[in-house]
Amino acid sequence: MKDLEWFVSICAANGLKISDEQASTFEKYRTLLLAANNQLNLISRKDEENFYPNHALNSVSFLFLKKLIPDASMVDLGTGGGLPGIPVSIIYSEMRLTFVDSIMKKTAALSEILRELGCRRPTVINARAEELSKKGDFQAHFDYVISRAAGKLDDVAKWSRGFLKDSGGDSGAAIPPGTLIVLKGGAFEEELKHTRSLKSVASADVIDMTFQGMDEIYNREKKLVLITFKRAPLRSWN
């Protein structure tokens, strides 16, 4: 079984240092998530022993390749038990996170997990993303949307556009604001084709998730998809 020490070492080998405090938070999150999973299917029970390779590492390994702007605001779309948002927020402690899921039992469990972790800044919302993104308080309000398993790529793009600020400006080596970040596995060529055909989409780049130590994990096929959008009135998108 891949444990916390293994996870910290893989991150360090790829230039992402996990402090002792962050490591402790990752382990506390693992304990809370698995406890909640006894009552509610937040992750597959067959996968509980693989928390660090399949969930923690899968959530943050894109940071080996790309960085985020400091003090960003982010929506974790279809978050379930807080993945990938909580692991990302452990690394970026100043991140202003909004967790969105349409299943009330999951958002209730997530709220309790965040309370136990002592998180003060995150917001948990039980809502459908395609409806929430049309509300004034949420439109064009966020730097990033991130998603790991919320649905087909083209659907996630449609749901996400309303949340995001317009892309633009020099963000240096960081992922620019206004970007949808999707951690995607399996074959999705057709979804990618449909996504690129949306009139709202400016670009949809697919990046191989290769890093030191990836040969030690089973689930290697994950890709990083970065989607940016054209500037235009929000109501015109489809």
Image (spheres, grey):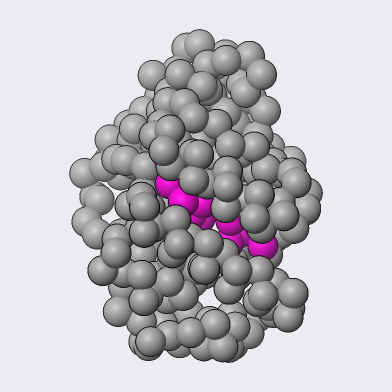
Q: Locate residue 56, reporting x and y percent.
A: 50, 68
- Asked if 229 appears above or below 149 in the picture, the reply is above
Can you tell which quarter of the image residue 64 is in? bottom right
**Residue at 46% from the left image edge and 51% from the top image edge:** 81
Residue 83 falls within the magenta-colored stretch: yes
- What residue is at 68 percent from the left and 64 percent from the top? 91
- Horizontal side of 149 relative to 134 (left or right) equals left
Q: Nearer the viewer, residue 16 or 38?
A: 38
Question: Residue 113: where, in percent of width, then height?
Answer: 57, 52
Image point (42%, 26%), residue name: 128
Highlighted range, magenta: 78-90
Q: From the viewer's perspective, tell me whether residue 184 is left or right of residue 168.
A: left
Q: Quadrant of the N terminus?
A: bottom left
Judge whether residue 186 can be spotted in this image: yes
* Residue at 57 percent of width and 15 percent of height: 135
Residue 12: percent from left, percent from top: 63, 85
Q: Nearer the viewer, residue 200 or 165?
A: 165
Residue 54 sits above or below residue 138 on the image: below
Task: Please indicate, yes or no, whether residue 159 appears anywhere in the rendered image.
Answer: no
The C terminus - image quarter? top left
Q: Is residue 165 above or below residue 151?
A: above
